[in-house]
Amino acid sequence: MQSSIPTRPWTTWGMAWGLGILLVLAVGIVLPGTIMIILKMTGVATIGQLTHGWAWAASSAESELAFGFSGGLAWWIAARQRRFGGNWRWGLWLKGLVGGGFLGAGVSAVGVAVQHWTGHPLPTDSQYLMTPAGIHNGPFLAMLIVVALIAPMMEEWFFRGTLQTSLAGAIGSGWAVGIVAVLFALLHELDAGHPLAHPWLWVPILPLGIVLGMVRARTDRMSGNIGIHMGFNLWAAVLMAMQFWH
C-alpha cells in the first residue's frame, strides 16, 4: 500500500501515537474530571445528581469525541496534513454499512449457537453500557446515537486513521493492522469495567478490528471501515433497543 506519510516514518509514528494517547487522556479523562471536581467543590452538582441518565449519555459522547479530536489533531501535528489518505467514497461506505450489519448478525448468531451449546447465556456488557442512561427515552436514544454514529466515526479516526496509518509507515501495513486490532479489542474490554475478566466481550471485537484494519489498508480510505463499524454497531444498537423496550 502506498503510504501518504512523509519521510522519517518512525518519527511520525512516535509523535502521532504519543500525542494521540496523551490527548485522549486529557480530553477524555482529565478535562471532565477537572470539571466534576470544580462542580463538587462549588456545590453546584455531582455526576450522581444529574438526573434521567443524561450525564451518562453526555459522558459517553464526550469520551468518543475525545478519540476523534485527539486522533485528528495528533495526525495533523505529526504528519502536517489534515487527511488520512484518499477521498471519501459513499459507495464504499454503503457497502461497509451493509457488510458491518451482516458481520454483527453473524457474531450474534455465533453467540446464540454458543449459548445453545453450553446451555448457559453468555454475559453481556449491554446492561453496563445502557442501564445508566435510565428508562427515559431521551438519554437512551442519545446513547443509541453515540453507539451507532458517534463512536464508529471517532474511533475509526483514532485507531485506523492516526494509529494504524502512522504505524504502517514504520513497520508495515500487516503488523500495523494486527497491533492496532489488539489494542482496539483490549481497550473495549477496559471500557467495560472488568479488564480481561470476561474474554467473551473482547474476543469478538478482535476479528472486527482486523477486518476494519484490512479494509483501511487495502482501500487507503476511511469510508469503508467507518461504514463497517457503523453497520456493526447499528445492529448492536437495534438489539439493545429491542431488549430495553420489549
Image (cartoon, grey):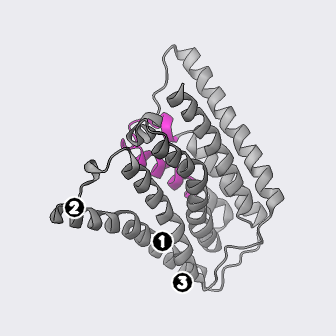
Expressed as whole percent of the image width and height from the top left, the position of residue 214 reads 71, 56
What amino acid is at disc 2? Answer: Val
Task: From this view, report whether residue 78 is shown above or below residue 238.
Answer: below
Provide the residue designation for mark 2.
Answer: 44
Among the 4 quarters of the image, the one containing residue 62: bottom left
- Residue 197 included in the magenta stretch of the image: yes
- Mark 2 or 1, nearer chain start: 1
Give the CA distance from mark 3 to mark 1.
10 Å
Q: Is residue 140 left or right of residue 231?
A: left
Expressed as whole percent of the image width and height from the top left, the position of residue 173 reads 67, 64
Provide the residue designation for mark 3.
Answer: 77
Mark 1 burial class by Cα count in 10 Å: few <14, some 14-19, many 20+: many
- Mark 3 or 1, nearer chain start: 1
Provide the residue designation for mark 1.
Answer: 20
Expressed as whole percent of the image width and height from the top left, the position of residue 37 reads 22, 64
SS for callout 3: helix
Give the CA distance from mark 2 to mark 1.
32 Å
Q: Which residues are magenta?
A: 179-202
